[in-house]
């Protein structure tokens, strides 16, 4: 049951990868979907490439809290309410212990954690009973991936945030759930700063650890996000769902 007719959905990082797949699934269910590009050029790219998916593309760098807050408030004012949030924008910049810089730490925590908190906080006045918030964590929150300590810590924070937000919003009839994808074939690894060779080696290493023997597709996360947004999941809140080809469990 993914009838989302008439719902207003805000997706962060919706211009590609998992965010785009989720935006497509939400839009296919009947929702009006909006996102933001990190700057005017990115926003224009997303508008011209995915005008069929997004009703509007705003400009907001998820690493900037003033921009994030202004974006969410603008969506609320433009549409009068927000029914679905998929807080998805994020990235990883691996560094081994001994090489983690304050800048590396702050960048990842700003985009992956701080923006999640301030996205939801800015949306509070526009969320009504029945609204559904979905946060994008990662199974990195429970695995021991060398070099990804800061990234994994951000995703552990997102998982915990989801639980506490759910507890705080349950009285308003607002649900909060967390998806934790396993390795998914997107631009994620290309954005890590790893060389092509490192990406290939890391990809092979990870694939060998997935019981299903492959990376997931962004659509395999997007469809579940649409389910969590829908009336098919109305008794779920505070939950983390692993979508990972069995990687964390088997
Ligand atoms: N792929 C995986 O294996 C995997 C596994 C578990 C969890 N995840 C999580 O899934 C989420 C989406 O990642 P993905 O795999 O779909 O990778 P992706 O294809 O690189 O997409 C990331 C999205 O986030 C946006 N973004 C990043 N930093 C931003 C910023 N400062 N301001 C605005 N937008 C920003 C990117 O915009 P640009 O296009 O402008 O860069 C892009 O739209 C992330 O939170 C990631 O941690 C991914």
Image (cartoon, grey):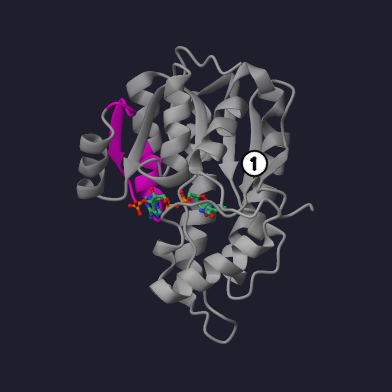
The reply to whether the magenta stretch includes residue 68 is: yes
Quarter-wise, where is residue 183 in the image? bottom right
**Vertical relation: 191 (above or below) 214:** below
Secondary structure beneath label 1: strand
Quarter-wise, where is residue 226 in the image? top right
219 relative position to 147: left or right: left
Q: In percent of the image, x 56 and y 39: which residue is there?
A: 221
Viewer-nearest residue: 174 or 23: 23
Please provide the residue range marked out in magenta. 52-71
For disc 1, the marked residue is 178
Q: In percent of the image, x 62 and y 52: which residue is there?
A: 182
Count of number-bearing discs: 1
Q: Residue furthest right?
A: 250
Viewer-nearest residue: 67 or 23: 23
62 relative position to 120: left or right: left
**Vertical relation: 191 (above or below) 173:** below
Quadrant assignment for the N terminus: top right
Q: In percent of the image, x 58 and y 42: which residue is there?
A: 135
Viewer-nearest residue: 107 or 224: 224
| Local crowd size for mark 1, using a 10 Å CA cut-off: few (<14), some (14–19), many (≥20) | many
Percent position of residue 203, x then y = 53, 65
Q: In percent of the image, x 73 and y 35: which residue is there?
A: 167
**Vertical relation: 79 (above or below) 92:** above
238 relative position to 37: left or right: right
Percent position of residue 82, x then y = 47, 24
The reply to whether the magenta stretch includes residue 60 is: yes
Q: Residue furthest front?
A: 213
């Amino acid at each position: 049951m993914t009838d989302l007719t008439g719902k207003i959905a805000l997706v962060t990082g919706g211009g590609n990868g998992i965010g785009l797949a989720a935006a497509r699934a939400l839009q296919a269910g009947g929702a009006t979907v909006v996102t933001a590009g990190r700057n005017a050029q990115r926003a224009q790219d997303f508008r011209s490439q995915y005008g069929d998916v997004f009703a509007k593309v705003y400009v907001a760098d998820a690493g900037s809290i003033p921009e994030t807050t202004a974006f969410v408030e603008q969506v609320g004012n433009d549409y009068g309410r927000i029914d679905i949030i998929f807080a998805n924008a994020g990235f990883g910049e691996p560094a081994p212990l001994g090489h983690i810089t304050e800048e590396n730490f702050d960048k990842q925590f700003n985009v992956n954690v701080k923006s999640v908190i301030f996205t939801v906080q800015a949306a509070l006045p526009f969320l009504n009973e029945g609204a559904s918030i979905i946060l994008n964590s990662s199974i990195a929150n429970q695995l021991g991936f060398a070099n990804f300590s800061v990234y994994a810590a951000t995703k552990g924070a997102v998982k915990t945030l989801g639980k506490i937000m759910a507890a705080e919003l349950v009285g308003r009839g607002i649900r909060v759930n967390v998806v934790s994808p396993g390795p998914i074939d997107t631009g994620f690894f290309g954005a890590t700063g790893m060389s092509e060779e490192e990406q290939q080696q890391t990809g092979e290493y990870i694939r060998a650890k997935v019981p299903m023997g492959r990376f997931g597709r962004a659509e395999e996360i997007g469809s579940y996000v649409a389910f969590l947004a829908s009336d098919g999941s109305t008794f779920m809140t505070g939950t983390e769902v692993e979508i990972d080809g069995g990687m964390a469990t088997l």
